[in-house]
Image: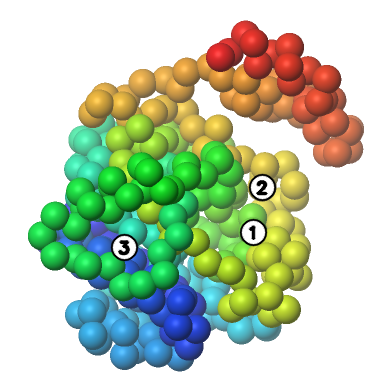
C-alpha cells in the first residue's frame, strides 16, 4: 500500500507550454517511492497524458456553472479511490523530489492529524525535463542559481491524513481563496500546520494565465468571489503559511521563529478577536500600517 496519494486536476493539454510543464510535474511524481497518482477531470488531452504516464485517471469530477472542477468532488474521488493513509492535493505544475516523501514520513510519525505545506521555488521551464540519473541534483542546482523562493502566500499543495478535511465547501479549483481556507480550517480544528520549507524543495514551473478566461489572474474572476463567500469571508482567506504552527527543520519539529511578518500577523489576529464587530478592512489598516514596517523590521532581522 503506498504511503501517499497525490491527486490533481490538470489544465487542458492544448497549450504547448502548459502541456510541457504538466508532463514534467506528473512525471516527477511517478518517480517518487511509495506514491500513487490520481488525475481528475476531462480536460482535453488529460486522458492521453494519464495513459502515457501510467497514472490513474478519473474523469467524472463535479463542476460549477462555469465548468470549473470543484474541490469537494476532487477530495471525495481521491478518498474513494485511494489506497493510502495520506492524501495530497497538488497543483499540476509542481515538481516534487524524494525529499518530499521523506518529509511526509517524518511528519506522519509525529502526528495523527496535521497539514503539511511549504513555500515554493519559482523557476522558468520551457522544455521537457531530462529525468535521466542525477536529474534531482541537476534541478536543485538550477533552482539555487536561477529560481526564486516565493513569498509565503498561496499554497500549491496540502498533505494530510485521511481523517482530516472530511467536509469541504464547493470551492472552484484554480481560483483564489480555497488554499487560504485550508489553513484557516486546520487552525480552527487545532491541527498542527507544518511548514516544511526548510526541508524540501518544491519547484513551481512559471506560466502565464492564458488558460483562464480573458487571460486574467485567478483572483480577478467571479469564481474567486464565490470561493471567498464559501470560505466565510475575507478573514478566512487571509490565512497563509505565516499562520503555520510548526516548522520541520533537520527532521525535527520546532515552533516558527519570530519575524516581522509573523509578528504583524499575530497583531492582526489579536485585533480581529478583540474588535470582531469592526469592518475587516479597518482592522487590516490598523494591523498593517506602512509606518510600522521600518521600526519592527529592525527588531526581527
* SS label for mark 2: helix
Mark sitting on residue 176: 1
N-term-proximal mark, 3 vs 1: 3
Mark 2 to mark 3 CA distance (whole Å)? 24 Å
Q: Is residue 5 left or right of residue 191?
A: left
- Horizontal and vertical percent position of residue 262: 59, 24
Examine the rendering and report whether any part of residue 118 can be seen.
Answer: yes
- Distance between the alpha carbons at the discs numbered 1 and 2: 9 Å
Residue nearest the viewer, comparing 133 with 241:
133
Q: Quadrant of residue 240?
A: top right
- Quarter of the image with the N terminus in it: bottom left
Location of mark 2 (residue): 237
User: Within 10 Å of the Cα at label 3, are there few (<14), some (14-19), or many (20+) other Cα atoms?
Assistant: many
Task: Tell us which disc is closer to us: 1 or 2.
Answer: 1
Nearer to me, 260 or 146: 146
- Residue 256 image position (x, y, % from top left): 45, 22
Q: Tell me the tag on residue 6.
A: 3
Element carrying mark 3? strand
Amino acid at each position: 500500500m503506498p504511503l501517499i496519494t497525490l491527486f490533481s486536476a490538470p489544465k487542458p493539454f492544448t497549450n504547448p507550454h502548459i502541456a510541457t510543464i504538466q508532463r514534467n510535474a506528473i512525471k516527477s511524481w511517478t518517480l517518487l517511492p511509495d506514491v500513487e497518482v490520481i488525475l481528475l477531470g476531462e480536460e482535453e488531452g488529460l486522458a492521453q497524458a494519464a495513459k502515457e504516464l501510467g497514472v490513474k485517471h478519473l474523469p467524472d469530477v463535479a463542476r460549477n456553472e462555469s465548468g470549473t472542477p470543484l474541490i469537494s468532488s476532487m477530495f471525495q474521488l481521491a478518498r474513494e479511490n485511494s489506497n493510502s493513509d495520506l492524501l495530497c492535493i497538488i497543483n499540476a505544475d509542481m515538481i516534487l523530489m524524494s525529499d518530499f516523501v521523506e518529509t511526509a514520513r517524518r511528519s506522519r510519525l509525529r502526528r495523527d492529524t496535521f497539514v503539511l505545506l511549504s513555500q515554493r521555488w519559482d523557476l522558468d521551464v520551457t522544455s521537457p525535463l531530462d529525468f535521466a540519473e542525477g536529474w534531482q541534483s541537476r534541478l536543485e542546482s538550477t533552482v539555487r542559481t536561477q529560481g526564486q523562493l516565493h513569498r509565503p502566500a498561496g499554497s500549491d499543495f496540502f498533505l494530510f491524513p485521511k481523517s482530516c478535511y472530511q467536509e469541504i465547501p464547493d470551492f472552484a479549483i484554480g481560483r483564489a481563496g480555497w488554499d487560504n481556507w485550508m489553513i484557516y480550517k486546520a487552525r480552527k480544528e487545532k491541527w498542527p500546520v507544518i511548514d516544511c520549507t526548510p526541508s524540501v524543495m518544491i519547484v513551481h514551473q512559471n506560466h502565464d494565465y492564458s488558460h483562464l478566461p480573458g487571460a486574467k489572474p485567478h483572483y480577478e474572476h467571479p469564481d474567486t468571489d464565490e470561493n471567498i463567500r464559501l470560505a466565510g469571508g475575507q478573514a478566512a482567506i487571509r490565512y497563509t503559511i505565516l499562520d503555520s504552527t510548526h516548522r520541520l527543520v533537520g527532521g525535527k519539529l520546532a515552533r516558527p521563529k519570530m519575524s516581522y511578518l509573523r509578528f504583524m500577523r499575530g497583531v492582526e489576529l489579536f485585533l480581529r478577536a478583540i474588535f470582531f464587530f469592526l469592518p475587516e478592512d479597518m482592522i487590516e489598516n490598523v494591523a498593517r500600517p506602512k509606518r510600522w514596517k521600518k521600526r519592527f523590521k529592525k527588531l526581527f532581522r
